[in-house]
Structure formats: C-alpha cells, structure tokens
Amino acid sequence: LGGAGSIYALARGGFQLQIRGVSPCIERGITVTYRHRVYFTEGVFASSNPLLREVLQDGVSGRRAKVLVVVDDGVVRAQKGLLEEIEPWFRRHGDVLELVAPPLRVEGGERVKNAYFHVSEIQERIDRGHIDRHSYVIAVGGGALLDMVGLAAATAHRGVRHVRLPTTTLAQADSGVGVKNGINAFGKKNFIGTFAPPYAVINDFAFLRSLPDRDRRAGLSEAVKVACIRDAAFFGEIERRVDSLARFEEVAMQGVIRRSAELHVDHIASGGDPFEFGSARPLDFGHWSAHKLEPLSEFRIRHGEAVAMGMALDVLYSREVGLLDAGSAERILGLLERLGFELYANEFHYADSGQRRVVLAGLEEFREHLGGQLTVTLLRGIGRGVEVHEMDTGVIARAMDLLRERVRGGVGR
Ligand SMILES: NC(=O)c1ccc[n+]([C@@H]2O[C@H](COP(=O)([O-])OP(=O)(O)OC[C@H]3O[C@@H](n4cnc5c(N)ncnc54)[C@H](O)[C@@H]3O)[C@@H](O)[C@H]2O)c1
Ligand SMILES: [Zn+2]
C-alpha cells in the first residue's frame, strides 16, 4: 500500500484508496424483476379445477416439481373434507407434481407468530422433503400462518418458491397478496421477517364460507383503509354496499376483496418502494396504534379489528388538527360502525408507571421499524392520504378520549 501510483485521500469523510485513473469504488445498479400474480377461484382442490396445476407447472421444465403443503389447523377443522381433497388432487396431477409428505397441519392464529418454533419446524420439513429452489411450499391459511410459513420459505435455501392460499377476508384482501412475511419477537409485531414476493397467490373464495363472522368482518377494515388513502370511488362503493357487507353477502364481499387486493398489489408494483426502503408506509394508515393494541390485548383484538380502531383514532386526529373535514371524518367512522366494528378498546387508555399511555410507544416503534424519520399517513380527504412527520401527543390523547366518549358514552369497557 502506498506504492507508486497510490495515495490515501480524504474523501466523503473517510479514507479511500486512490489509484491513479481507477475509481475508488465499484458501483453498479442491481435490478431484480418480480412477477406478482394473484388469481381468483372457487374450490382450488376440486378435481375439475386445473388452476393450481397450471400455476405450478408454469415454473418447471421437464421434471416433476416437489411440493410441501402446510395447512392452518383452524381451516382443517372448519372445512370438513379439505385434507381428504388435497392428497387425491396431487395424485391426479402426479405426472408433474410430487407431494413430498402428507399436508402438515399447523395451528393458525397469532400464536403461530409468537415463537420461532414453527419456522424451524417448516424448515426441517423443507430439508426432509428435499424441497429445492425450484420446488414449492404451499401455505393454506389465515394471515398469521401465511406470514410464518412465508418466512420459513424465504429463508430456507435463501428462498424457495412460496405459493399462498389465503383463507380469511383479511389475508385475501391484504396480507396474503403482499410481499411481506414475518413473526413477532421481543413484544413487537413482525420484528423478524423478510420481503419476499410469493411465487403466486390464489384467492379461493370457497375458503371464506367457514369463517366465523368475526374473521369475515375483520379484513374489511383493510379494504376501508386502502379506500381511505387511495380511492374515493371505492370508498363510495363500500358505503353503497354496506348493508350487504354487514350481512357478509358473497357477491358484495368478493367484489370488495378483489378491489382491495388490486389496490394493494398496485401499490406494491407501482408505488415505487415495494420493499419499504424509505421512511413511508402509506398502506399502514391506522397501524401505528393498531400494532400496539394487538399485543396489549394479548392478541384478543384481531389485527383487522385493531386496524379499525387505529384508523378511527387517526381519523379523529386528522379532524382535530384541521386536515380532514368533519363530514368526511363522520362518514369514515360511520362506515366502520355500520360494518360492525368496535372503534374503541380500553387498551387505548392503558398507562405505564409514569402515567404515559402505553399505546404512544407505538409511534416510536413504528418509526424504528422503518428507520429514518417518523412518517405517519393521515387523511386530508377520503381517498387522499397525507404524510406527516410528527404527531402531537396531546391531540392523540384528546382523540382517544373522544373515541371513548363516542363509543362508551364516556364510560370504559
Ligand atoms: N404480511 C403482511 O403484509 C400483513 C398485512 C396485514 C396483516 N398481516 C398479519 O395477518 C395476521 C392476521 O391474519 P388474519 O386476520 O387472516 O387472521 P389469522 O391468521 O390470525 O386467523 C384467525 C383465525 O381464523 C382461523 N381460520 C383461518 N381461515 C379460516 C377459515 N377459512 N375457516 C375457519 N377458520 C379459519 C385461523 O385458524 C385462526 O384461528 C396478523 O398477524 C397480521 O399481522 C400481515
Ligand atoms: Zn394491516
């Protein structure tokens, strides 16, 4: 070092070795293109339904593709006959597909994300089944199971093909069609995870028929969310169909799920930041407090329910700081209520030993999750999200009080 032709030079605050005529840094852009596909169907494992075969076959040339199937136990229990359908379906398509083991049943719901155990269980099955980067891991289940299996698939062999079959309203309308996966750790939602676009997503509406009302409803909050920040016409559509949606009528539900999925996919594909490198996360409108309400309630409050509450809080906040007119705020709160959502939970008012409301920690956790500057999406109209970089904790507290008064007539739950 320091021989003929080399000198140390101070550049950009650090020492870089300068060789005459040679750049001190090799810099190249790396572009990776993904194809993101979300299909809609009914009865994906029915003997006459060729969709899954076509999707999987598309990615293999001249050999049988290995497949591992992981199924949400809640779905298995609710959909009698599902397991009995899966193995014969693969046998029928045995010329191109090889099921490496009987479908693996794993518990569903948030608990599955609260420990690493299940991720290593799936990875062990991937290893044992010799699933390689041209094989498939198919996950059938709610958003929580898909998040967990997605993480296992994205990390085994640095990423095997992951096909998602979401089985809840929320997962079909939002989480299952996205590119994120993960599990919870250290009391924080989605602390461990990756960005990994799935190989394909298949939304099978027949799965929704066995959902309890609570889970049928929960995902509708994410449709309202994306309408609020992106699409006033869609918001109007949800308003027009609110009575049918409150009764979970299939035509209305399917239309809303489809449009919500499309808006989420459009954002990922065209929003300019699919892997969230920046500080903004517009699709997480209402989520900074929702992500706190979930663990504070020990996950008794479902994600979609917490999002309805978190949106209600941020709608009132937007109104209180003069961003959103009172009429629009009322339309949004009214719509959520007519869909059957509760807009307040006592967890909003939980305080720590210093009398600070615990939910407020969600703001800093939200910032830290992305890094950089705090960026929260609020509303300046229906269909018009706006990014702000600070929130006044006094106004947040007032908005929480207003929400409590609205819902409980000033009395806690
Ligand atoms: N990755 C993302 O971008 C993203 C986005 C939003 C939400 N999420 C995550 O999604 C999770 C919530 O998912 P969810 O709302 O789908 O709930 P869930 O996965 O927790 O499932 C709720 C319950 O329904 C059962 N179930 C699932 N499908 C069923 C069916 N068809 N019939 C009967 N029972 C069924 C499950 O076993 C579970 O007990 C949260 O962990 C949330 O953080 C992820
Ligand atoms: Zn969400």
Image (spheres, rainbow, N blue to C red):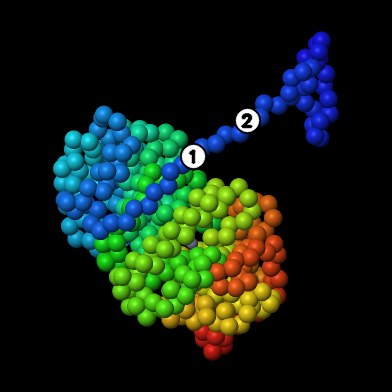
The answer to which of 265 and 165 lies nearer the viewer is 265
Determine the secondary structure under disc 2.
Answer: loop
Q: Amino acid at mark 1?
A: Thr
Q: Is mark 1 within 8 Å of ligand 1?
A: no
In this rendering, does residue 412 appear at all?
Answer: no
**Lower sequence index among marks 2 and 1:** 2
Dot 2: few (<14), some (14–19), or many (≥20) neighbours within 10 Å?
A: few
In which image quadrant can residue 160 be found? Answer: top left
Q: Position of residue 308 (x, y in %)?
A: 49, 72
Q: Position of residue 149 (x, y in %)?
A: 39, 47
Q: Residue at x 26, y 66 (%)?
A: 210
Residue wearing tag 1: 33
Of the 4 image quadrants, the one containing the N terminus is top right
Determine the secondary structure under disc 1.
Answer: loop
Left or right of 297, for residue 377: right
From what the image shows, is residue 135 above or below residue 349? above
Instruction: Point out the residue furthest to the bottom here.
Output: 409
Q: Residue at x 39, y 67 (%)?
A: 256
Q: Amino acid at mark 2?
A: Arg
Q: Position of residue 372 (x, y in %)?
A: 68, 52
Q: Ligand 1 is found in which quarter of the picture?
A: bottom left
Label 2 to label 1: alpha-carbon separation = 16 Å
Dot 1: few (<14), some (14–19), or many (≥20) neighbours within 10 Å?
A: few
Instruction: Point out the residue furthest to the front here.
Output: 233
In which image quadrant can residue 320 be found? Answer: bottom right
Residue wearing tag 2: 28
From what the image shows, is residue 121 above or below residue 40? above
In this rendering, does residue 209 appear at all?
Answer: yes
Q: Position of residue 324 (x, y in %)?
A: 63, 76
Left or right of 224, for residue 199: left
From what the image shows, is residue 290 above or below residue 138? below
